[in-house]
Image (cartoon, helix red, strand yellow):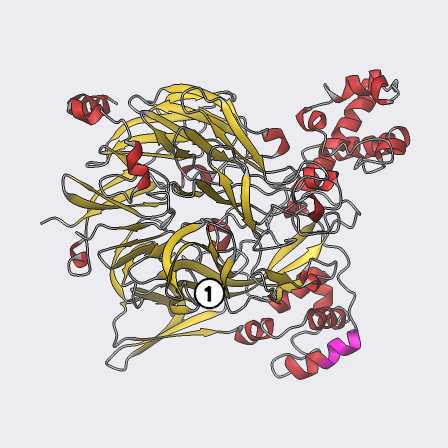
Amino acid sequence: MKLNLLASALLPLSAWTQMLDPALLTKPATTSWPTYNGDYSGRRYSTLSQINQSNVRHLNLAWIFRAKVGATPNAIIGGVGKPTDEVPSDPGTSTIKATPLMVNGILYFSTPDNAWAIDARSGHELWHYYWKSKGGIHIGNRGMGMYGNWLFFETPDNYLISLDAKTGKERWHLEIADVKQEYFSTSSPIIVGNHVIVGTGGDSLDVPGFLESHDPETGKLQWKWWSEPLKKGDAGSETWPDEYAMRHGGGMTWIPGTYDPEAHLYYVGTGNPNPVLTGKSRLGDNLYTCSIVALNVDTGKLVWHFQPSPHDTHDWDAAQTPVLIDAEIDGKPRKLLGQANRNGYFFLLDRLTGKNVVTAPMIKTMNWSKGIAANGQPIPNSSKEASIPGVLVSPPTGGATNWPPPSYDPDTGYFYVGTSQQFSMFYLTDTDPHPEGWGAAERDAGWFGGDLEAIDIKTGKVVWDHHYPFTGGPVGILTTAGKLLFTGDGSQHLVAFDPANGEILWHAGLADDVSNGPETYTLDGLQYLTVGAGDSLYSFVVEN
Amino acid sequence: MITIKLHAAALALATIPLAFSQTPPPKYDPASVERGRATFASTCGFCHGASAKGGEKGPDLLRSVLVLHDEHGESIGPVILNGRPAKGMPHFALSPAQITDIANFLHASVLSAEDRDNYKILNIVTGDAKAGAAYFAANCQSCHSVTGDLKGIAAKYDPATLQGRFIEPNQSQSEGITVTVTLPSGESFTGVPVNYDDFNVSLRDAKGDYHAFRRTKDTKVELHNRFQAHLDLVLRYSDDDIHNLTAYLVTLK
């Protein structure tokens, strides 16, 4: 305890000038990592090349930070739940799924109910904040958002909490959703201008999803966008049988979105409709669930939508990061958006109009669609909806991929994503005309391994893949101008690949599987590579 | 114990492991829930439906925010006792014990809707046993015999478990897997993999000895899956094949 205080006291004064420069958010970060994806594009491509193919074999561990969750002796304690001395046993609470922010030499990150500031040079803890929870599913937390000196993160019991970055002391908290209705929040707030944009999750009961924006100073609600129409006549209401179905229709905003400052549009993917695995009480496409949507960032008004899984009945959220890509298509420069979707398809859209450019399958086992419609939407085969005797479907509910962040490398023109090839049996269990919750049971039915895939965005073709017979699957990825791709292999290694051809160039053994998206930045002119694996952060450098 | 994990569940966004080996004790006293179900059906079911999912006049109580916030009847009770005259709901003079039972029934019903790990699979035996026998003869008979290894198999497993066993017989990704490592010298080791990745492979051989190897381009590593034929079938089954085969196998009592 004393050591920590001493360490803080020894920091030079300049280290406390943590004010985040808003301009950092509109250009690729090099000396900071100021937002969940590093910049607004969601590419997770860094222009840094100090660590590159010629020296990556000299990449060395600088430090490890082990995150101890709960009411630790030094913790700043907040929250509205009952006091508890117990250290939470749920591994979701201690697993680092957040991508830490790095601003002015300090890393900021969170796990469910917990937040930390640590010195990015040494890995020393500056403060730890612990939130006494009322409940909610403690499965994961994507991290924090930062506006000036203020930090923001969400909790499983659906509070948006603002902390003073300097001290870790709470500024305010407010409730964004009702944990008793089985909402639980995992997303990382994204700051755009003076908007703190937050989403929520939870699909155990049948509640509607939303995205909302808060004032960073006061927390006041600025706008709220519901991911379903609320009444007949609203846009999208024609895709639901009745108001009751749409008001209980799901569509969670699990994962932070991306932002195009020129178009002034915020892009986010929405989750599955409810009831989850049976669609008989919600006939129709169920807009705007399982959709990629573009919202005006100042008003929250919908500008366009594209729905990767119309009338989803397999829990295939379209929440995966909508990655903003500038590239030439047929010789013309285009503003594009790519998404590797949980349903097994890769989608490339025009991000100004939402019009489809490419739809292509990412996995060979996929068996739920009858093909691709003229507008680029897959056509669901209704015979693959859960039945009493069971149907065999690939991918299973977990999807071909999932929340871990993919990457787009403008040097190769490839989109990188971790996938898995798997089947499940889906058995209808709720035969009521108005099923509730999930409505069907799922059982594992065959595993065909995982792959790290490089997808040519222009054709959707898999250019190379690295197959894992037992592991692989969704995992966070970073690409850099050093012609390197960093990711985990599911066997407790951090691995560097050649993004052009998939050749392995370097690896390091960790104490757990890579559990977040790797990130990079320079400090004092030295490039760091930092990754979360289980309850620890690892930071690597090439020393001269 | 192999370190290979069922990682899909671990990484999935909102996926909770699909099967639990043990069922926790019920959160609400089953006897109280059943009394509550009966009282609810006779007193409230006319408007709210016997399952409380809503009826002609009354709303769905399993999606009621008041019910979801109630713990032990403290919010539900006053509504029952006082009614909601403005909305046309009459009052009912139920005893505190009856109110507790109804609250337990409603909360247990909510729990059973949201708790997908404990959903009960219904009757999956709907297929054509004759077609299943033909499928078995064509696809399974080269390894299995209904009078040999599968004799009485249907007496051992309920239909859903039996179906699960033929679709995916391995209970973990590593079950049934062996690995053979051949060194540049020609020396060869075969056993159950303990670790398998791009950099290292290790195994435990038939004698129980542990062997670990660094993978190089001159070290040959081969995997064998005892259940490969089952995995191959997963890519070929129609849903009817699965239903028919199940209908046939359940006759092997």
Residue A89 x %, y %: 46, 36
Q: Is residue A421 above or below residue A43?
A: below
Chain assignment, label 1: A
Residues in magenta? B129-134
Specify whether B140 is left or right of A118: right
Quadrant containing the C terminus of chain B in the rendered view: bottom right
Specify whether A339 is left or right of A72: right
For the point 79% across and 78% down, the residue is B130
For the point 49% across and 55% down, the residue is B8
Residue A130 vs residue B150, the one in the foreground: A130
Q: Is residue A317 above or below residue A467?
A: above
Secondary structure of the magenta portion, mostly?
A: helix
Q: What residue does disc 1 label?
A: A449
Residue A538 x %, y %: 27, 44
Residue A38: which quarter of the image? top left
For the point 34% across and 49% down, the residue is A44
Residue B112 x %, y %: 70, 41
Tell me the SS state at disc 1: strand
What amino acid is at disc 1? Gly
Q: Is residue A154 above or below residue A427?
A: above
